[in-house]
Amino acid sequence: MTHRDADDGASQESDGGAVAPDGRGVAPGGAAVVQDGAAVVPHGAAVVPDGAAVVPDGAAVVPGGVLPGLPPPPPPGATALPPGTYSGTVVLVTGGGTGLGKAIAAEFARLGADLVIASRKEDRLKAARDELASLGGRVTAAVCDIRDAERVADVFDVAQEAYGLPDVLVNNAAANFPVPAEDMSPNAWRSVVDITLTGTFLMTREFGRRHLAAGTPGSVIDVGASYAWTGGPGFAHSAAAKAGVKSLVETLAVEWGPYGIQVNGLVPGLMPHDDMTDDIRGNLDRAGDTAAARQPALRVGLPRELGWAATFLASPYARFITGHTLVVDGANWQRRGLVSPPVVTVREQLGLPAFPASHAARTPHTSSAPGTPAAPRAPSAPHTPAAPRTLTAPHAPSASHTSAGPLTSPASPGSPTSPTPPGSRPSPTSPRTTPPAAPPSPRTPRANPPT
Ligand code: NAP
C-alpha cells in the first residue's frame, strides 16, 4: 500500500511492508502498531498477539526499553518560514516531478515561489505540475536530460521566459541502483556518474553563468548523500558521484561567493516515498532498513523535513551559510556501536551468488586446491593470501584468461591455477613471474544490471 497526502503535494512514505505513513514503524507482517515516529524492536520481538505492542505516544520499544526517539515533525502543510518568504522568487528543481524533488518543490511553493520542475519524463512532470500548482504558486514543467548541456540551457530559457532567471536552483535529480563493484558495467558507472555529477555540474554552471553575467545573487542547493563521506558499499558509482557533488559545493561556494552566489549541499537520510525505483525500494525492503528501530531517531525521515531544510538554506535567513552540506538524517550516518556488527558482503546483501567456498574458507598461507601448491610467500607479507583464485560463474574470467591475464601472478611458471586473488599484490619475496605472452582471451560475458 502506498499513501499520498493530497494536501502535501509531495510523496509521503509508503509502507512497502515496513513503513507506515508518517514514519510509523510496522513490523514484518505489519503486526507492531506504534505511534507516530515510534519504532518496533528488531524482528517484531516485542509484538504480542493481536498487534498489541502499543507504547506511549511517540515512544518505541527497543532492546533498551521504551524510548521516545526523535519527535515527529509538524503535520503536512506547515511551513518552516514566514508565509510569502519566496514570493516573487523563481525556484528551479531538477527531478521535481517525483519523490524528494517534488517534496522540496512543494515547500517552496507553499512559501510563494514560482516553480520550474525539470526532468526527462513528461507525464510525471505534468502530473506533478498539477499537484504543485494546487498549493498556490505558478508551476512550469520543462523536459530536460541534465546530461545534455544544450537542453540544460533550454530549461533556463524556458524559466526566464516564464518567470525570470531562477533565483534558486535545487539539483535534486540523480540515478542509482545497487550493484557490487565487480559486476558494474562501464555503462552503469557512466550513467550514474553522468546524471548525478555531470548533470549537477552542467545545471550549476548554467545557473552561475547567467547570474554572473547579470550581476545578480542566487542560491544553489545540491541534494547529496551521506556516503559522499563514508563510501557506499554496493553503490560505488553513486557514492563516487555524490562525493564529487560535495566537492563541487565546497569549490563553487568559494569561487562564486564574491559574486553573491551561495552553494550548499543537502543530504537526506532514509526518506522512503512512493516514487522510489523498484531497485532502491527492493534494496530497502531486503535489508529491512526502513524499520524505524534501525534508525537512531527511531523513525525514518519524512520528505517534507527535507523540503523545510531546503527552504531554510536558500532563504534570507541563511545568507551567511555557503559551502556547507547539511545532513537531515537523524544522525543515522554517524551511527557507531561499542560492538561492531558482523560483516556481510555486498553480494550477500543483494542475494547474489557467493564466490566459491575455497575463496571464503581459505586459511592464510595455505592452498586449499588439491595438487596446486601455494606460491612461496613471506609469512608476514601483507596482502598476499595464498588461496588460489578459482572463480566460477557468473564472474569468472575464462580459464585461459586466468592464466594469461594481467591480474594473475602464478606461483611458478606453468602453474596457472595459483594466481593472486583480486586486490592482492605480489609478495616482495615472491618474484612476479608473468607467463609468456599469450593472446588475450575473450572474457566471459557478464550479466550486468540494466542502466
Ligand atoms: P527519485 O524519485 O528516483 O528521483 C530522481 C529524479 O531524478 C526523478 O524525478 C528523475 O526524473 C530525475 N532524473 C533522473 N535522471 C535524470 C536526467 N538524466 N535528467 C533529468 N532528470 C533526471 O529519487 P529520490 O529518492 O526522490 O531522490 C532524490 C535525491 O535525493 C537524489 O539526489 C538522491 O540521490 C537523494 N537521496 C535520496 C534518499 C532517499 O531516501 N530517498 C536518500 C539519500 C539521498 P525522470 O525520470 O523524469 O528524468
Image (spheres, grey):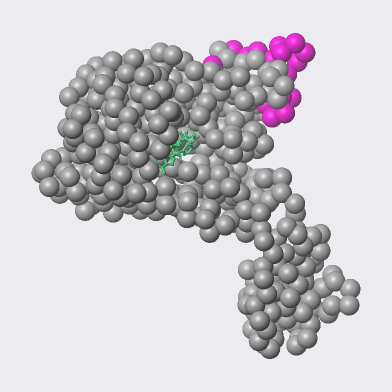
Nearest to the observer: residue 280 or residue 344: 280
Single out the residue that lies furthest toward the right.
Answer: 370
> Residue at horizontal 78%, vertical 86%?
414
Residue 206, position in %: x, y? 24, 47
Above or below: residue 207 compared with residue 380: above
**Residue 174 visible in rendering:** yes
Find the magenta span and give its range. Answer: 36-56
Q: Classify residue 266 as left or right of residue 190.
A: left
Above or below: residue 115 compared with residue 185: above
Quadrant containing ligand 1 reads top left
Q: Give the quarter of the figure containing the N terminus.
A: top right
The quarter of the displayed image where residue 116 is located: top left
Q: Classify residue 424 as left or right of residue 257.
A: right
The quarter of the displayed image where residue 336 is located: top right
Residue 86, position in %: x, y? 22, 24
Residue 67, position in %: x, y? 58, 23
> Residue at horizontal 70%, vertical 67%?
397
